[in-house]
Amino acid sequence: MMNYCFWYGESKPSDLEWLGTAIRLLKENEWDGQTTLYFDGRSWGERLREEAAISLLQALQTNSSVKSLYLRQADLDVKAETALHQVFENNKHLERIVLRNIETTAGILPIPEGLFQNPSLKELEVTKGFLGSASLAALSASLLSNSMNHLSLDNVVLDGCLNAFANGIEKSESLRHFSLKNMRLSQTETGLLLEAIGKNQSIRSLSLENLNLGTPQIDLIVTMFTTNCHLEKVSLRRNIIDGDAAASLFRDVSTFNPSLRSLLLSGNPLGDEGARAITTFLKCNTSLETLCLVDCRLGKVGCRTIAEGLKAMQGIRQLYLDSNEIKSSASPILDNLQNGNYSLTEISQRSLTSTNTRQKDDDSKQTAIWLQIEMYLRWNKLGRKVLRGQRLDLLLSYVLNRVNSDPDLIFSFLKESSAIISR
């Protein structure tokens, strides 16, 4: 009883007491279509629980009221795997399917081609699975049918020719979110998919994470950004984009179309050279609003380069620099917020609390600076232009960080005072 729990919806845990009711609702097509049928099978070792899950899957095969299925952390025996495959073959009403870390007696879960022959399927997320040639062809056909708008593959083996898959990506007019993570792809396969993504004109959100993208693929990445004029959010986290690759990627401001609003590069070894390239780029680009550079091996020089360039960055609103040497750059960040950057509303920093007694005084000064930085970020969020009066910022920082009321209300009130703020 402790190893497995059915879930009704995504937040209300229960156990076998609702099983009979759930099966009846499935068989009578009275399941609430807004409620996800959620299985968390971290251990299906107990026979009773496995048979109960199989009963639910069997009832789901002919059901038309369930729209969303979420199955994770399950070890399927042959009977359970067969029941799940029959759901995919027979149920043509599921609109969203999430399969995460499903094991079978033979290893990872093979995704049957019948799953992609469901005309209702709009969203598919698979973590740890296997797509053979027939399933890849069926997936490609599903993309071309313009029914699927969300596809996420994480640690999925693609066993077959990717030409048809790439063609489906390129020509899909419905795909809005596409994600590939932790995939083992050859350089040729990576190039094929990057070219297809570049030509697609429907994808708005793209994640290509932990794919070993680096210098050899940088020209393909640049081409992808240049040719796709509809991308709004892109994540290239945990690849191997170093300083040289970053210099190529950010060399020309025209590489990134104005549609791009968010770029996540965390976990890449950009280094100080990458920081210089990014700073030069951001001084010219006014459309990119969110940039994530967490754990990018930015040293003191690189962080200071970005901090000193903030004044000229009039588009960036959210800048994430955690797990880099950002601590010593607090002063130039504050200086540039005081003297010209009116767009930045959020900037992250590493913990300023030190266990080293000798650094306590320095930590105290840093904390005071960051409190002032936070004040200016709030002013920017409210449309701040210029504060009137020398040292007024220090006075406001002292007051606003000690009020008990909602600070945003205080900021909103002060914003209207012409004696304090000038537009």
Image (cartoon, helix red, strand yellow):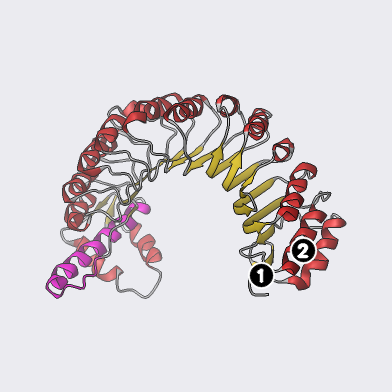
- Residue denoted by label 1: 13
301 on left or right of 324: left
Q: Quadrant of the N terminus?
A: bottom right
**Residue 395, percent across and down?**
21, 67
**Residue 58, percent across and down?**
81, 54
Quarter assignment of residue 212: top left
The amino acid sitting under disc 2 is Glu
Q: Nearer the viewer, residue 151 or 32?
A: 151
Q: Residue furthest right?
A: 28
Work out whether 282 lies above or below 366. above
Badge 1: few (under 14), some or many (20 or more) residues near its Cα, within 10 Å?
A: few
- Residue denoted by label 2: 51
CA–CA distance in space, label 2 to label 1: 19 Å
Residue that appears at 73% across and 67% down: 47
**Residue 287, percent across and down?**
38, 36
Q: Which residues are magenta?
A: 352-381
